[in-house]
Image: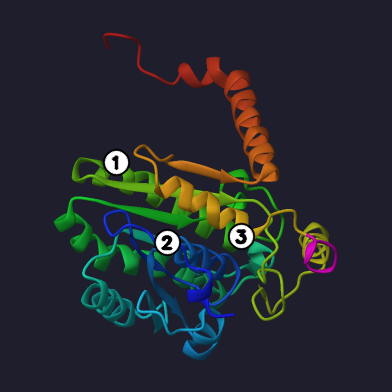
Amino acid sequence: MNISDTQHSQPAATSKVWFITGAARGLGLALARQVLAQGHRVAATSRNLASLQNALIEGSDRVLALEVDPVSESAVRAAIEQAIATFGRIDVIVNNAGFGQQGAIEALSDAELRRNLDVNVFAPMHVLRHALPHLRRQRGGHIFNIASIAGFHGGYAGWGSYIAGKFALAGLTETLAAEVAELGIKATVVYPGPFRTEFLTKDSLATAQQAIADYTQAQASLDLHVNTMDGRQAGDPDKLALLLLQAASVAEPPLHLFAGRIANELAEQKMAAVQKDMAAWRGASDATDFPEGA
């Protein structure tokens, strides 16, 4: 079925231009389809143009499919320029492209770590660096950076590289929000829980070449995610896409957006654990200050 068969036209004044990375599958694809169904326009990127075109079934003048290696800054810059040339503006950016890397921290090589961070941290930076000049000129826009509840809760053995990248993306988003607020630009970090996408499949999830037998919890976590959780995740990508559309439509969107019941519960656990540590060590911690007036 062609996307145009399910489109609901939006008045020109409310139609937005979305720029979505990693749009050939998973959340990116679900979001691109929902964006189009609600009458908006979309510039969708993927490493594989054919798979993207097949997934979106091009043919509408509201779709621009772009083959982009997210690690290549020049390719990202060209994609943004093409989106601007095609649609005249970009209103919503979704940094969604990314992949999981599993392996104990000691076992990860520099090459494995850098490859993961290149895609999960530096690739979003490429988008921001070249899209923000356009948003500044517009004095408006909304940036969604897709992190993970793992990048808020932390503490999962065997996922150090992925978690580090998502923590970095979250911190970057919080700082970005403070910088662009005066320009009328919004920024939201999204913390999805487990959603039923291809994230845990062999084609997506990378594992460290080296395995260290002593790290039994790291191996157990890999086995749990790949053999038990994959295909049974609680989250529905289509509903997450609708949540992002809802957040993009309000005047005061959240800076932190937790997606799914599991994500909210894990966030509450993390905040309670931090408060417990703070309370237990508050006296000793406060005592490290100089005396008042010193």
Task: Tell me the quadrant of the picture where the C terminus can be found.
Answer: top left
Residue position marked by numbered label 3 in the rendering: 238
Q: Nearer the viewer, mark 1 or mark 3?
A: 3
Based on the picture, tell me whether residue 231 belongs to the magenta stretch: yes
The secondary structure type at the circle numbered 1 is helix
Q: Nearer the viewer, residue 135 or 274?
A: 135
Q: In the rendered structure, are the residues bearing label 2 and label 3 in contact, judged by CB atoms less than 8 Å apart?
A: no
Badge nearest the viewer, 2 or 1: 2
Kindly tell me whether residue 59 is visible in this rendering.
yes
The residue type indicated by label 2 comes to Val
The mark nearer the N terminus, 2 or 1, is 2
Of pointers 1 and 3, the one earlier in the residue sequence: 1
- At x 46%, y 60%, the residue is 38
Query: For mark 2, what is the residue?
Result: 94
Q: Is residue 21 magenta?
A: no
Tell me the element at label 2. Answer: strand
The amino acid beneath tag 3 is Asp
